[in-house]
Amino acid sequence: MKNVIVLIGAGSIGQAIARRIGAGKQILLADLRQENANAAGKVLSDAGFEVSTAIVDVSSRKSVHALVQTATALGSVTGVIHAAGVSPSQASPETILKVDLYGTALVLEEFGNIIANGGACVVIASQSGHRLPALTPTQNKALATTPAEELLALPILHSDSIKDSLYAYQVSKRGNSLRVMAEAVRWGKRGARVNTISPGIIITPLAKDELTGPRGAGYKRMIEISPAGRAGTPDEVGTVGALLMGPEGTFITGSDFLMDGGVTAAYWYGELAPK
């Protein structure tokens, strides 16, 4: 039986992780748009990886469940890379919550039911989750443990509580890291692990949308003032993803890895701090 790596989201970061852990395995690459999956699949296939593609809408349980069935028909699912999502400049608060928050909960629930013993998952969150002020312990637990189908009804997510797309994104990404911490307990019972990576500004097409969007000047200032003084690359995130999903990361689960060149440090304790 083949070992299967499921890559959800055809973007640069997910591909970078898949390239590091996918050799000798079947990669199932799923995206909302077939043309995106095909294009990314060709890049990986041309580099020597065994790739098949599928369509998935992570905001639909039926669609995510169908992807699970496709994956298990190929073999034993030993890895999941969840890198699908929308950014504040791309979508409304409602869409961000449905895709980035609810969609991630769906993926973790559905794949947590079938992940192989020894398997691992990485969810791509964001530095934005680290710039949200502290929530209450009750709110944290609700975001972490509320069943997916009840998640969007939480009071913290009501329209009068969500100020704009950026705030929806921050709450979603904070929710992702909390959900992964809770899911690590359940995944552990199957002998599997799950972690989040919270990247900062990584040069991808999505990041370029942000850098040229309404908050572009702020993002450029973040890069200039950050301790690293530059944006990151997908390959750097791929290195951390490979650690978390590989044999050297087997003591790491339920954790969130912030890799943002020090932007969050500068936001809380440096020149980027809110006035």
Image (tube, helix red, strand yellow):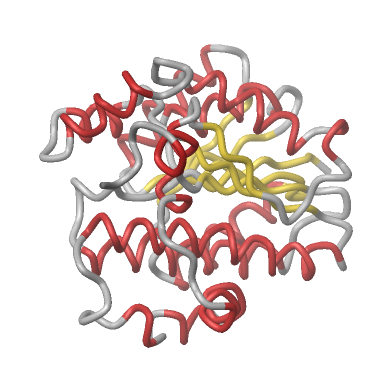
In percent of the image, x 71 and y 42: which residue is there? 4
Residue extending furthest left? Answer: 214
Q: Total marks drawn?
A: 0
Picture quadrant of residue 259? top right
Position of residue 160 relative to residue 31, above or below, is: below
Which one is nearer the viewer's eye here, 271 or 174?
271
Task: Please give left or right for residue 155 compared with residue 177 in the image.
Answer: left
Q: Is residue 217 left or right of residue 118?
A: left
The answer to whether 151 is drawn above or below residue 59 in the figure is below
Name the spot of residue 95 as percent of width and height, x first.
Answer: 26, 64
Identify the image quadrant of residue 159: bottom left
Name the residue located 49 percent from the left edge and 65 percent from the top edge: 134
Residue 255 lies, with reference to residue 95, above or below; the image says above
Q: Residue furthest front?
A: 275
Quadrant that contains the N terminus: top right
* Left or right: 103 in relation to 217: right
**Residue visible at 22% across and 35% down?**
210
The spot of residue 100 in percent (x, y) is 40, 59
Expressed as whole percent of the image width and height from the top left, the position of residue 38 reads: 39, 31
Q: Residue at x 31, y 50 (%)?
A: 86
Residue nearer the viewer, 245 or 182:
182
> Is 139 on the left or on the right of 204, as rendered?
right
In the rendered image, residue 205, in percent from the top left (x then y), is placed at 29, 27
Residue sitting nearer the eye, 268 or 15:
268
The outermost residue toward the top is 47
